[in-house]
Structures are given as C-alpha cells and as structure tokens.
Image (cartoon, rainbow, N blue to C red):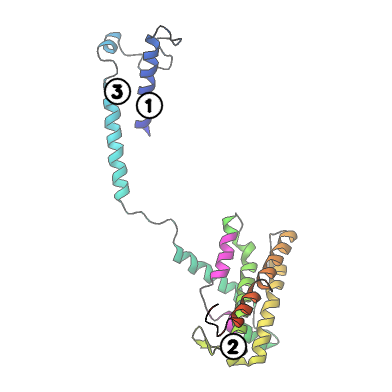
Amino acid sequence: MASVNLCSWVQSYSIFNQASRSKYSLLPRSLPFNPLMNLSSSTSKTRGFASIPSICSVITKGDAVKEEEEQQQPQNPSFDFKTYMVQKATMINQALDSAVSLREPVKIHEAMRYSLLAGGKRVRPVLCLAACELVGGQESMAMPAACAVEMIHTMSLIHDDLPCMDNDDLRRGKPTNHKVFGEDIAVLAGDALLAFAFEHVAVSTVGVTPGRIVRAIGELAKSIGAEGLVAGQVVDINSEGLTDV
C-alpha cells in the first residue's frame, strides 16, 4: 500500500509541477504539501525526482515478492462444512431428545422417539438454523423451528413406509416403525409428531415476537399441506407403475 501511495504521489507531483510551468496554470510553483521542500535548490535542479521512481520500484518489487510468497503458502479454509454439519447435528439431536422425552403414554412416545432419534444427517433442521444465522438471528431462536422441521420429516418417513404407501421393511438399516410397533401405532406416532411440531414452535420459541412465530407456523403448515409435502406424496402414488411421468 505504501508503494502505491508513493508512486501516486510522485505522479501527482509531476503533473502539478508541469502545470505550474505553464503560463496558463493557476497553481503556485511551490506546493504547500511538498514533503521535499527541505532539499537544497541545487539538488532539486540537478537531480529532480529521479530517485523517487527508483525507490518506488524497489518497494513495489518487494511487495510483489512478499505477496507471491503469501500466495504460495497453504491457506486454511475459513469455513469447514463437515465440522459445521456435525456440530449442528449434535445440538439438534440433543434438542430433539429433550423435546420428545419418554413419558405417558409410554408406547406412543417410544414409537415417536424410535424414528425421530434413529439418526440421519439432519440436513433440514441444519438449514433452518443456518438461515436464521444468515440474517443475524441467534441459534436458540430457531432451534424449536428446526426441531419441528425434523419432526415433520420423520412423520413423512413413518407414513411413507406404511404398507398402504411404499411398504418398506427397513429405514436407515433398521426395521421400519410399523414393523416394530404395528401399523396402528405407526400411524398415530406420525400424527403425534405432526401435531407436536407446531406445538413446539408455538410454545418453545423464545426471543421472537408472536407475530413472527405465527408467520413461521403459517409458512410451515403451507409447505407440508395439500400444495406441499402431501401433494408430493400424491404425485408419487399416482406415478407408481407409469413409464412416462
């Protein structure tokens, strides 16, 4: 930066100096901000500013070498995506475990927890937290909403695995919910997760105005309704066996 400023100053001074020699120029011959005023008149006449560009060139060359050396050094990435995902997923798992605790009626809560805590990358709730952080919010504000998104996603998996839908026996390497608890409990576990998702956002969200919470609930409901998640399931069912979808 210093070399650039020095070169710019030399060029500027040269322009001003040339302008001062013109009979049309209104600028004075001696600039008040000239830092070389203490040079003798004989020196300035014989040598002028010939040494200044040389100094500028030396500094510029040195800066260029330094910049090249810095570029050759390995740069550590400022953002580690894998670490970020693991950290957020760990916090989300803890929040889900706390939100859906084992209580009465025990069987339905066992079924809810069986699928909810069965693992997964937690991409959806992580995206929820990241979106909140992106606009300057705190993670604690969005955690209930992030958990709600994962509860709804789990509900969709439980229902999607049912015999009346995809009739899957395994989910993430484990027996599906209806294989462990029966079809009736599996349906109810999904229903309970869906209902509790909205309850959790409404009751557990802190530091957010009621108006914003209501808007978030409205957006979430719309995204999973007849024009969202359910619509996708209907298309999936209607497309079964078709060769041209």
Circle 2 packing at 10 Å, graded few (<14), some (14-19), many (20+), is many
Label 3 is placed on what type of residue? Ile
- Identify the residue at horizontal 65%, vertical 75% (top origin): 231
Q: CA distance from mark 2 to mark 1?
A: 73 Å
Q: Is residue 134 left or right of residue 201?
A: left
| The N terminus: image quadrant | top left
Q: Is residue 45 above or below residue 160?
A: above
Q: Magenta span covers which residues?
A: 114-131
Q: Say if 42 sits above or below 162 in the image.
A: above
Q: Name the residue type under label 1.
A: Ser
Q: Is residue 105 above or below residue 153?
A: below
Magenta stretch contains residue 126: yes
Q: CA distance from mark 3 to mark 1?
A: 11 Å
User: Residue type at mark 2?
Assistant: Asn
- Residue 177, numbered circle: 2
Magenta span main SS: helix
Residue 142 place in picture, x, y as percent: 63, 64
Dot 3, crowdedness within 10 Å: few (<14), some or many (≥20)? Answer: some
Query: N-terminal of the two: label 3 or label 2?
Result: 3
Q: In this figure, which residue is indicated by the disc labeled 1? A: 8
